Image: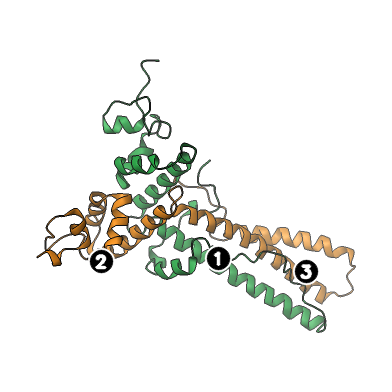
Chain colours: A green, B orange
Amino acid sequence: MGGSSPCASCKLLRRRCAKDCIFAPYFPSDDPHKFAIVHKVFGASNVSKMLQELPVHQRPDAVSSLVYEANARVRDPVYGCVGAISYLQNQVSQLQMQLAVAQAEILGIQMQQEPAMPTQIEQDDKSFPLATNYNLDNISQSLNFASSSNVIQDPALKRESLWT
Amino acid sequence: MNSGRCAACRYLRRRCAPDCIFSPYFPSNNPQRFVSVHRIYGASNVGKLLQQLPTHLRAEAADSLYFEAQCRVEDPIYGCVGLVFLLQQQIHDAESQLAKTLAEVAVLKSHAKHPQAQQFEAESDFNNLLQKQLDNVANLSFSNQATSGFM
């Protein structure tokens, strides 16, 4: 197997693709665009450092997320992924408002029908708290620079899985 | 004039020119901001990116780069994409909950209009209306659109 082709990274960087090339498992030669975009935004050296700091089994997801971020940044050089986050947060807020209105309507109807009846709104449903592990309150404040006119209105933000 | 250098030029140990691309956005009183961004993107890439933008957009770009860099430092695997995941899941859950609640509203309203409706119709009504509401919610602007290519 002496003639295996270099990975996309080594092709772009015009270097020999070693057997233990850190990029090779994640940037196959048949998808040159994937590495090109990550290299453009982060730089090969930074990507290599980031991957080296991770255990091998976590590297595929890291690469996928880097590709996602790089694509977002190329599409929107001002806001990158942050534009997407702002957009999604807006959607969550709107849905929460709509839900609150609908729940209030249920209460109203029930009170009209049977004022003494206990509420039947399902409290066991998770009322989806905003993401806590990223401390969204702080994020919201720091995200107020992403005005709606500049936010990515991107269909890819829908609940498609980011990577298969 | 060492005290006049921006955080970037201090870190890079170079002279901070009057037209330094970094200095408006990486002031010397916040060295960590540049360190984060440099660690993830590299000064050269950040400089190139800012250069390509009109001046009035560079501050926002620097802020978003810093935010993403921080997310990546805190979560080296997913960075800020983890947050995107989380929000997408929240939207999905919220849509389902909203559809269910709207279906409940519709059933309650219909029974309020026709109180003599049989009890066993209630579940069928609810299921039909739930399906309708799920379809409606799914047709909202951020639903049911083809994936375009972030990946």
Q: From the image, tell me which residue sits under label 3.
A: B107
Label 1 secondary element: loop
Question: Can marks 1 and 2 be said to lie on one chain?
Answer: no
Whole-percent x, y for residue B74 in the image: 43, 55
Query: What residue do we see at 37% from left, 68% from top?
Result: A145
| Neighbours of disc 1 within 10 Å: few (<14), some (14-19), many (20+) | some
Subunit ID for the residue under disc 2: B
Q: Secondary structure at mark 3?
A: helix
Q: Can I make out residue A151 in this image?
A: yes
Q: Residues within 10 Å of mark 3 (few under 14, many from 20)?
A: many
The amino acid beneath tag 2 is His
Query: Which residue in the protein does label 2 denote?
Result: B56
When the figure is inspected, residue A102 is found, relative to residue B5, above or below; the finding is: below
Against A40, residue A115 (above or below) is: below
Task: Residue B9: give its label.
Answer: none
Q: CA distance from mark 3 to mark 2?
A: 53 Å
**Dot 1 falls on which chain?**
A
At label 1, the amino acid type is Leu
Mark 1 lies on residue: A130
Residue B101 in the figure: left or right of residue A151: right
Q: Residue at x 44, y 58 (%)?
A: A84
Quarter of the view holding residue B28 = bottom left
Residue A99, image quadrant: bottom right
Q: Are marks 3 and 2 on the same chain?
A: yes
